[in-house]
Image: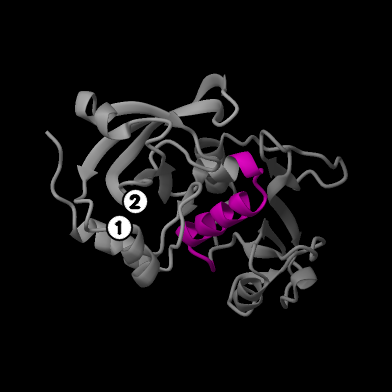
């Protein structure tokens, strides 16, 4: 049966910009692929006798070692055909996957992605994570966001930790408004800024684009507290799914 080794190498090069490394002269068929930033391995291809994996054959088989973040998932996978406990690297939820054809190539790629994320640096995980929704405060004592959005649909804003380009932010305007008024899309992050007046401290800005407006009486603080368990908005925070759905249902319409 045809091995997926060559196909996998091409995929790792194209998808992750990872080149094969041959670290052991004694084992020329052992190949490591690692992250470019933290240098951690996320894939190890090996050729080993099948009986080393518990198979009833001494023929050489190609396997791929990957790391699974969830130990319970790893336990489930190794019960399936073509999956084994990690050969020579059993610690840390590593598993071995046959490259002999028992496992579909698309599924192999799925577990490569899992391993890539499980071994990635915090910066890489942040960059690759799906877009998120945030609730962030806007204090009219320091900045008149309502006036700003009357002039422009795209403004600079203090960047919150963990927020990245493509995320959605809902602006909660503090007293005397005390309600969610705006839905915005983050279009740029990590804009250098040095500002400190004793009350507001900023080291970087993000650019946000106004998408929707909400009526002040639709999501006031008492509704956020009683219905969604949000009693205060003092910094960037995620929002519950129920509030996310309610916000979408209450959108006034796209700005023109």
Q: Residues within 10 Å of mark 1 (few under 14, many from 20)?
A: some
**Residue denoted by label 1:** 220
| Image location of residue 113, percent across then percent down | 55, 52
Which residue position holds label 2? Answer: 178
* Mark 1 residue element: loop
Instruction: List x then y, in percent, for residue 91.
Output: 80, 64
Mark 1 and mark 2 residues within 8 Å of each other at the beta carbon: yes
Badge 2 density bin: few <14, some 14–19, many ≥20, Cα 10 Å: many
Residue lying at 57% horizontally and 19% vertically, measured from the top left:
194
Report the magenta stretch's main SS.
helix
Q: Camera-side residue: 48 or 221?
A: 221
Q: In which quarter of the image is the N terminus?
A: bottom right
Q: In this view, does 13 lie above or below 106?
A: above
Instruction: Decide if residue 91 is on the left or right side of residue 244.
Output: right
Is 111 within the magenta? yes
Q: Where is residue 183 in the image (x, y as percent from the top left)?
A: 29, 45
Look at the image and tell me in which quarter the C terminus lies: top left
Looking at the image, which residue is at 41% across and 50% down?
135
Is residue 10 visible in the rendered structure shown here? Answer: no
The residue under the point 60% across, 73% down is 73
Q: Is mark 2 on a helix, strand or loop?
A: loop
Observer-nearest of 67 and 128: 128
**Chain part drawn in magenta:** 102-123
Residue 195 picture quarter: top right
């Amino acid at each position: 049966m045809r091995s997926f080794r060559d196909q996998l190498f091409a995929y790792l090069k194209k998808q992750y910009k990872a080149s094969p490394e041959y670290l052991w002269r004694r084992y020329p068929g052992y190949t490591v692929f690692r992250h470019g930033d933290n240098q951690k391995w996320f894939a190890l291809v090996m050729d080993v006798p099948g009986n080393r994996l518990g198979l009833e054959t001494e023929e050489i088989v190609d396997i791929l070692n990957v790391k699974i973040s969830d130990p319970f998932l790893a336990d489930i996978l190794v019960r399936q055909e073509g999956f084994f406990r990690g050969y020579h690297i059993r610690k840390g939820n590593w598993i071995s996957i046959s490259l002999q054809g028992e496992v579909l190539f698309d599924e192999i790629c799925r577990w490569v992605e899992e391993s890539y994320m499980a071994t990635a640096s915090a910066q890489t995980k942040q960059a690759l994570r799906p877009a998120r929704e945030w609730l962030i405060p806007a204090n009219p004592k320091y900045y008149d966001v309502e006036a700003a959005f009357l002039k422009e649909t795209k403004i600079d804003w203090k960047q919150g930790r963990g927020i990245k380009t493509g995320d959605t932010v809902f602006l909660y305007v503090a007293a005397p408004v005390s309600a969610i008024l705006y839905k915005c899309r983050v279009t740029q992050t990590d804009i250098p800024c040095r500002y400190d007046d004793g009350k507001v401290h900023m080291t970087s800005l993000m650019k946000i684009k106004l998408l929707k407006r909400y009526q002040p009486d639709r999501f006031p603080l008492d509704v956020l507290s009683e219905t969604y368990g949000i009693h205060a908005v003092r910094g960037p925070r995620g929002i519950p799914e129920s509030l996310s759905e309610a916000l979408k249902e209450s959108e006034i319409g796209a700005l023109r």
